[in-house]
Image: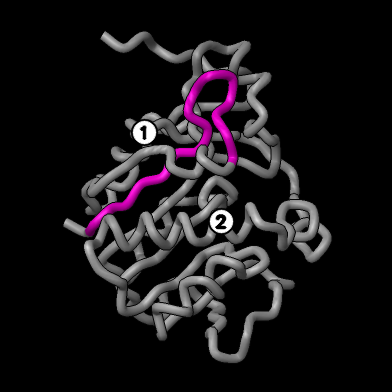
Amino acid sequence: MTPKIVVPDNYAIDSNGVIYQIRYGEFVYDFAYVEMRYNHDAPISQMAHLRLGYLIGALGRTPTSLLDVGYGNGEFLRTAHKLVADCEGYDVPPAYPLPPTIGQTESLYEREYEVVTFFDSLEHFRNPYEIASLRCRYVMISVPWCHFVDDAWFMAWKHRRPDEHLWHFSLESLVRFFSSMGFRLLCSGNPEDVVRGELNGLPNILTAVFERS
């Protein structure tokens, strides 16, 4: 039997096993934040190519259309657009400008896409369950992998960023989260650790691809 997790003050666990922050303050996502979190050096380009390759491998082909949610500096979209003609991005304003050949939408739910991607973005949502309204066949996601070894581990974990990262997923809770919205797991792993590295001997970033059931 899996031992029961007892989370610290101001955190709770929902019915799918996802750990979330209860009370939080406003967090500013602006150009300064993007500059702090991203740059244009080789690892960022490697990450974009790795993500695209993983997606194509999971589907067994190149997707026909794609929406990248929380696209940051747009590196993944610029890379994907070399193969996927129909690419769009969504981010909170003020969002980085994208090349004119790549669309920019103000709604996640306005149109249908074959694939919607969330790279280091869903954990920032105030209510991630709202993505149940997505009109897509596949979702690809990368999130910090929350192993919750114990309370001390969680409190010291580098990805526990109060007010910024509000939701924390293990593989089990991520699968249950998407299952509750009608998606089944196609594949999962930690391929981004090739670039970003493991964390204290444990997988660092959890990547998974889901298909609508």
Q: Residue at x 50, y 14 (%)?
A: 149
Q: Position of residue 138 (x, y in %)?
A: 29, 62
Q: Which of label 2 and label 1 is nearer to you?
A: 2
Q: Position of residue 60 (x, y in %)?
A: 22, 62
**Vertical order, 138 against 128 (above or below):** below
**Vertical order, 52 against 207 (above or below):** below
Q: Residue at x 29, y 38 (%)?
A: 176
Q: Left or right: where does residue 116 sit relative to residue 107?
A: left
Between 45 and 131, the one nearer to me in the picture: 45
Q: Position of residue 64 (x, y in %)?
A: 31, 79
Between 210 and 193, the one nearer to me in the picture: 193
Q: Which residue is mark 1?
A: 171
Residue 136 falls in which quadrant of the image?
A: bottom left
> Callout 2: few (<14), some (14-19), or many (20+) C-alpha neighbours within 10 Å?
some
Measured Cα–Cα span from mark 2 to mark 1: 24 Å
Q: Amino acid at mark 1?
A: Leu
Numbered tag placed on residue 46 in the rendering? 2
Q: Left or right: where does residue 148 sit relative to residue 184?
A: right
Q: Which residues are magenta?
A: 196-211
Q: Amino acid at mark 2?
A: Gln
Residue 96 is covered by the magenta coloring:
no
Between 183 and 6, the one nearer to me in the picture: 183
Between 171 and 127, the one nearer to me in the picture: 171
In this figure, what is the number of numbered marks? Answer: 2
Q: Position of residue 145 (x, y in %)?
A: 49, 33
N-terminal-most mark, 2 or 1: 2
Residue placed furthest toward the front: 42
